[in-house]
Image: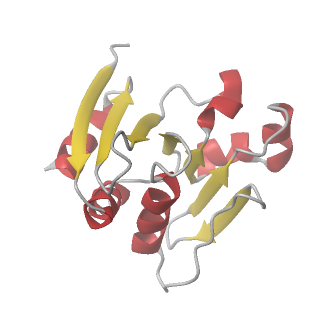
Amino acid sequence: MTKRSAAFTSTSPDETAQLAIRLGRTLRAGDTLLLEGGIGAGKSHFARALILSRLPVPEDVPSPTFTIVQAYELPDCELWHADLYRLGDPDQIIELGLLDAFQNAICLVEWPDRLDDLAPPEALTIRLDDPDKTDKREISLTWTNPAWTDRVTEALA
């Protein structure tokens, strides 16, 4: 499969949230977003905006830093938000049920490097960088599954 990529520069947290919302509209069960970037790059902000945009009734959307996984019921499927920063061993991913969720839910995964070779190959990788330590974010999206091409194009429009 050919690796494809796109880039977006966000000049504010609101622009980052709007990108997450637009992309979130295109997601369905079995889709996984791998959210990369350093501490404070905006991964949780992106995930929170996307989750809130999909919930039928607004609710608190905490970062799953300590719980590792937070699941939400959507009208059409579950949405799992995982923060793997504190994960000690990739085998814990199996115990958490994340491999099943990759097949049956929408999954947002922060710190996907902790997945090692368990990362779904058809996932969309979103890297958020904050090179100037401001509200500006350089956001790159990469994928190999052709199904992402139109959805990424739509979200970036």
The x, y position of residue 23, in whole percent, is: 32, 54
User: Does residue 4 lie above or below 65 as drawn?
Assistant: above
Is 91 displayed left or right of 28 in the figure?
Answer: right
Is 97 displayed left or right of 22 in the figure?
Answer: right
Location of residue 3 by image quarter: top left
Task: Write the residue at 27% across / 63% down.
Answer: 18
In front: 121, or 6? 6
Is 10 displayed left or right of 28 in the figure?
Answer: left
User: Does residue 128 lie above or below 136 as drawn?
Assistant: above
The x, y position of residue 7, in whole percent, is: 24, 35
Pick the quarter of the image with the N terminus. top left
The x, y position of residue 104, in whole percent, is: 61, 50
In front: 90, or 42? 42
Task: Write the residue at 51% across / 52% down.
Answer: 40
In front: 10, or 68? 10
Location of residue 66 by image quarter: bottom right
Is 118 displayed left or right of 46 in the figure?
Answer: right
Task: Write the residue at 22% across / 55% down.
Answer: 11
In front: 120, or 131? 131
The x, y position of residue 87, in whole percent, is: 79, 42
Number of marks present in the image shown: 0
Task: Write the residue at 53% across / 25% down.
Answer: 121
Q: How is the image coloured?
A: secondary structure
